[in-house]
Image (cartoon, rainbow, N blue to C red):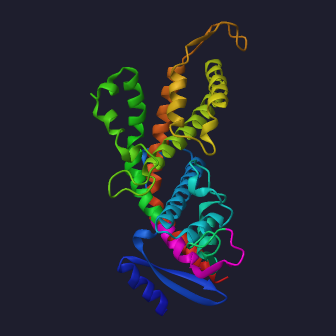
Amino acid sequence: VVRVLFAMLLRRLGGVLVAVVVLGEGVWSFVPSSCVARPRVARWAHREFAREEVAQQKLLLNNFLTQRSLQTLIYYQETSRDQVTAGWLERFLNHEGMARFHGTRGLKLPWDEYVKELMTADIEHIVVSLKRRGNGLGGWSRNNPYLQARYFNYTVDIFPRELGERLLDLRAALAEEWRRDLKDVRIVHKSQDLSRRAIAVNGTDADAKRLEMPALDGYDPAIGAGDSTAFRGGNFDLLVRLSAHQAILRTLARLERSGTPQSRYSADFLSAFFREHGAGFDGDAPYHVAQQFFATLVDQPPRVLSTPHDAVARPLLLDPIGIAEQLMADQALVVALWRDLLRDVPADNAQARRLALESSFL
């Protein structure tokens, strides 16, 4: 009864009582109500997606957000001259090479499982051995057989739970930054269109000039405004790439479901074009994969299928620019959905902390 009354009091104070029961023992903690997920009224972007699609996009976005948060954390450890912790993070759960990976599917397991494993991992003590003096070091002769090498050992303590908390904090920071930057995805396509008319070259369009800002251009974390996170330019490039990839898959599925000869003709063309020019969407790849894909697509000439297609004698017209417009429209829907889903990151982080707490008592 006391616990129930206490929970009612906390709810009035703006929070909820979370109970974790382990072997009959109650472990209670206070969680701010702002971090508790609630059913939300479906916004317009949600109405364009089935419930299963929303769940898939949420998992995809959270996995990518955690991957980039991990890469940012590794970078911060390296710039703090803590190479030992940075190396440990790369080795944890087989994520070697993560620090220099420029792709969208670098996380080896679902994001919540990764966070749980990280926050419940045991503390480690890593002994580092450095060569202080010896052949060729400290002014000693390189080839003197009588000079023995001397080593200096020190211990670095790894606290996985603290690293997990920092990772969740970075997820929240990146989510806010991405919600702002995702609004500029439309400018990428507009800039491409303007450049084809030589307007962007003359600098007469404000939106096109915005893309020249360092914060949205390079992978060097030192660039950009003072309030930017590391790799902001790389994050934006990958957000454009991943949202374009999802738009391609969404457009293909819709064309294939349509069943009309015109839709099948367009679907066959887009599928073949993606196989030929879409290799960069998966794995480690250079910058501007999506931009190059769209530029190559709109440069394709229109085609007319004059032979009968499924006993239909009427010629079928293939319009690559029209297909590109469909892709951009679907990408705009994906981006709108993502900006909405990113609002849930604080609640997702609170859920991840709760799962890690429950797991630590099992």
Residue 110 x, y percent position in the rendering: 63, 60
Residue 217 x, y percent position in the rendering: 41, 42
- Considering depth in this image, is 230 or 156 the residue closer to the camera? 156
Residue 23 x, y percent position in the rendering: 67, 88
**Within the magenta stretch, is there residue 157?**
yes
Q: What residue range appears in magenta?
A: 143-169
**Within the magenta stretch, is there residue 165?**
yes
Direction from residue 199 to residue 172 in the image, left or right: right
- Considering depth in this image, is 220 or 20 the residue closer to the camera? 220
Quadrant of the rendered structure where residue 200 is? Answer: top left
Quadrant of the rendered structure where residue 89 is? Answer: bottom right
Residue farthest to the bottom, as pictured = 2
Direction from residue 258 to residue 35 in the image, left or right: left
Rendered view: 347 above or below 182: below
Rendered view: 186 above or below 342: above
Rendered view: 87 above or below 224: below
